[in-house]
Image (cartoon, grey):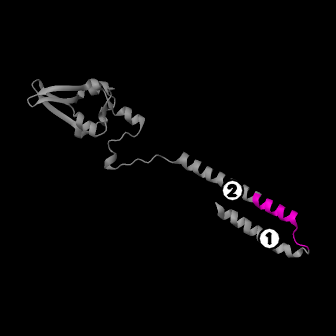
Amino acid sequence: MFKPLIAGITALSLTLATTTPLQAQGLDRDDVGKLIFGLAAIAVIGAAIDNNRDRDRNRRTQVHQTPQRNNSWSDLNRDHQNAQNRRRALPHACLRSVETRFGQQRLFGKRCLERNYRHVNRLPDRCAVRIYTTDGPRRGFDPVCLREQGFRSDRHY
């Protein structure tokens, strides 16, 4: 910020230093006052121009910057964008509790999700489960696995 200002003052002082010996009487109080006032005005104008350039530079970088996503392992469960959050909200009506020989198991029913959730094909394959009940096998998705992958139920608590 101060480099152009210092360069301008140095150039001005060198110019004045070479013209000063030509005057036989030197500078009086009025001339010195005018010189100081002129240098101060130049400094203020230079600082204002430099400040305006910095503001323009910052504005350009803010407009053209795209948000950086952190794709580390610790960032997998964080919600990133509103559209993505809507896609990750599963219908709570599809959460079923089925009886198996090992007790109650919970899962999001596959057929219910296909009817009520638009992005079934985007659910992770590793969360797909097949549970054997007394009524036969049921296909669906494990809610704990889906929660670990960033999906949630749309039920409002």
Q: Residue at x 69, y 53 (%)?
A: 48
Residue 37 percent location from the top left of the image: 80, 59
Among the 4 quarters of the image, the one containing residue 42: bottom right
Residue 45 lies in the magenta-colored region: no
Residue 85 percent location from the top left of the image: 38, 34
- Specify the amino acid type for callout 1: Thr
**SS assignment for the magenta stretch, majority:** helix
Secondary structure under the numbered disc 1 in the rendered image: helix
Total number of numbered discs in the rendering: 2
Residue furthest front as drawn? 29
Relative horizontal placement of residue 154, taking residue 5 as reference (left or right): left
Q: Residue at x 31, y 38 (%)?
A: 150
Relative horizontal placement of residue 69, taking residue 57 as reference (left or right): left
* Badge number at residue 47: 2
Quickly name the residue at label 1.
15
29 or 87: which is nearer to us? 29
Relative horizontal placement of residue 1, taking residue 41 as reference (left or right): left
Secondary structure under the numbered disc 2 in the rendered image: helix
36 or 115: which is nearer to us? 36
Quadrant of the snapshot with the C terminus? top left
Q: Counting other residues with Cα less than 10 Å from the Cα at mark 1, is it few (<14), some (14-19), or many (20 or more)?
A: few
Residue furthest left as drawn? 101
Q: Counting other residues with Cα less than 10 Å from the Cα at mark 2, is it few (<14), some (14-19), or many (20 or more)?
A: some
Quadrant of the snapshot with the N terminus? bottom right
Residue 53 percent location from the top left of the image: 64, 53
110 or 39: which is nearer to us? 39
23 or 66: which is nearer to us? 23
* Badge number at residue 59: none
N-terminal label among 1 and 2: 1
- Specify the amino acid type for callout 2: Ala
Segment tinted magenta in the rendering: 25-40
Residue 153 percent location from the top left of the image: 30, 30
